[in-house]
Structure formats: C-alpha cells, structure tokens
Image (cartoon, rainbow, N blue to C red):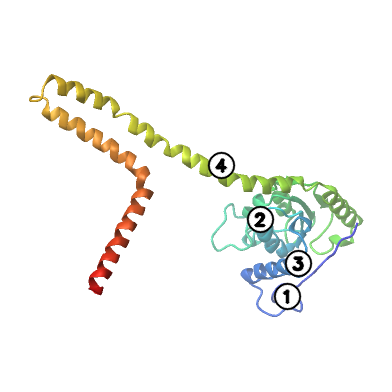
Amino acid sequence: MLVWLPTYDYSGYGQSSGKPTEQNTYSDIEAVYKCLIENYGAKEENIVLYGQSVGSGPTLNLAARLPYLRSVVLHSPILSGLRVMYPVKRTYWFDIYKNIDKIPLVNCPVLIIHGTADDVVDCSHGKQLWELCKEKYEPLWLTGGKHCDLELFPEYIKHLKKFISTVERSPTSKHIWRRSTDQFEPPRRSSDFFEASRKSTDYWEKPRPSVDKCKSIHNKSNGKEKNKFKFSFESMENSRRSVDCFERPKRNTELMEKARKSVDRLDRIWAG
C-alpha cells in the first residue's frame, strides 16, 4: 500500500500565520486541495481526507462538496463548536463547524475513530456522526482512549490500514456511474419541459367544435344568431392566439426584418 501524505497547519496554528477563524480554515483546506489537483496531478477519486478534532470541520465542509471523493477519516470529531460546550438540540446560526448538518451530504465511505474516555470532545459526538453517515464503515471506539493519545493504541494503526486497503481495492465504477447519470439528466429535464408544452396544443384543439357549431348557426339564421356567431368567432380567435405563441420566434424574425427595412428607408431619406 503506497500512500502520499501531505500535511499542513491551519491559519494561526503551528507555523502558519494569520488568524484561526472558521472561514480561514475553510480557505486553508481549499488551497491544499487545489494544490494537489493542479500542481501534483492528483485526482479527486484518489484523495482521502483526514480531519482530527476541530479539523473535522474543514474536512467535512470540503467533503460535502466533492461527489467523487475516495473516502474520509474523522479522528475525535465534533458535532459542532457549540455542542462541544453545551448539549443543544438544534443548530443555531452563530454556531461554527456544523458537522452534524454536513456529514449527511458526504457520499463516500467514512471512518470514525474516537476514544471512549475523551474528556475534551465526548465520544457521543463521534457516535452520532457515524449514525448520520450515508456510507458507514466499521467505526473504531477505543476503550480508555482520550483526545490526544489514540495514535498510541495498536488498534488505531491496524484499523486505519485496513480501511485504506479496503477503499483502495473498492471499484470506482459507482463514481463513473454518477458522472454518466449527471450528464444524462439535463436532456431528460429538457424533454420533460417539452412534454409539458404539448398541453397548449390540446387546449387549441378544444375550441374546434365551436367552429362547427358556428357554421350550423349561420346556415339557420343570419339575424338572431349574430351575437352567438360573434361569440364563437371570438372563441376561435382566442384559440388562434394560443397557437400563435408557437410562432413567436417567427414573428420576432419578421419584426427584426421590418425594423431593418425601416432603418434602411431612414438611411435613404437622410442620403436624399
């Protein structure tokens, strides 16, 4: 198994300058992803995102917008910033790193690792995120593990290696199928839209009996039935107008041609 592992510090962390804000961390991971794609020729289908603790926020924010991502690993993740401090039951606008709302949008396999004795981010965060995953992979709940010592457990590297090997062997045909489906969907929508417009043609057909009725009335009398004839004629005229909506492109062309002729005529007047 060959894995290339690029690492980086978020703004305000480690050797990075700047301020450690939510938006800055989103920009940081975007920059790293862009670098991998543009500078190193990496493909989205071969990228595994790994986020630990607060880093689970930027990781899921990016993963939720990459439909062909290979997989995601969440190490001691948080449900959201506010939920680390308070057991709130809903998401507030001022909350940060709303992982609880973003993880259902992730389409690739997700591995979650959390220590049962974590006194910084309770293990319930990891368990609830795992329940919300679309494609669940066997999680790793390390008994007695805290927030910053999970790498010391033998099970950690063993389970992580197993996960990477599994997603490495998994076919990418599903991702290819998604792309082909996405490309096929737009024509289907345009066809559905065309089908809906056929109803106006059906509407045009309905007034036709009134024309036949109009003819019979006219043959019987030209005096008393003038008003009825006028009404039928107006109905026929309205139905004709509904058909004329199909001729709008042609009318637009005629209008443009008339306008051009008027301009030519005006030019000749000025020239005279």
Say whether disc 2 or disc 1 marks the residue closer to the N-terminus: 1
Residue 4 to residue 88: above or below: below
Could you tell me if the residues under marks 2 and 1 are in contact, i.e. CB atoms within 8 Å?
A: no
Q: Are marks 3 and 4 in contact (CB under 8 Å)?
A: no
Query: In the picture shown, does residue 245 fall above or below 230?
Result: below
Structural distance between the alpha carbons of marks 3 and 1: 21 Å
Where in the figure is residue 263, as x and y percent of width and height? 29, 65
Q: Is residue 118 visible?
A: no
Q: Is residue 51 visible?
A: yes
User: Of the residues shown, which amino acid type is indicated by label 4?
Assistant: Arg
Judged by depth in the image, the label closer to the viewer, 3 or 1, is 3
**Observer-nearest residue: 94 or 135?**
135
Question: In the rendered structure, which disc, 1 or 4, sits on the residue that comes first in sequence?
Answer: 1
Q: Which tag is nearer the camera, tag 2 or tag 1?
A: 2
Q: Amino acid at mark 3?
A: Leu
Name the residue tied to disc 4. Answer: 188
Q: Which residue is mark 3?
A: 36
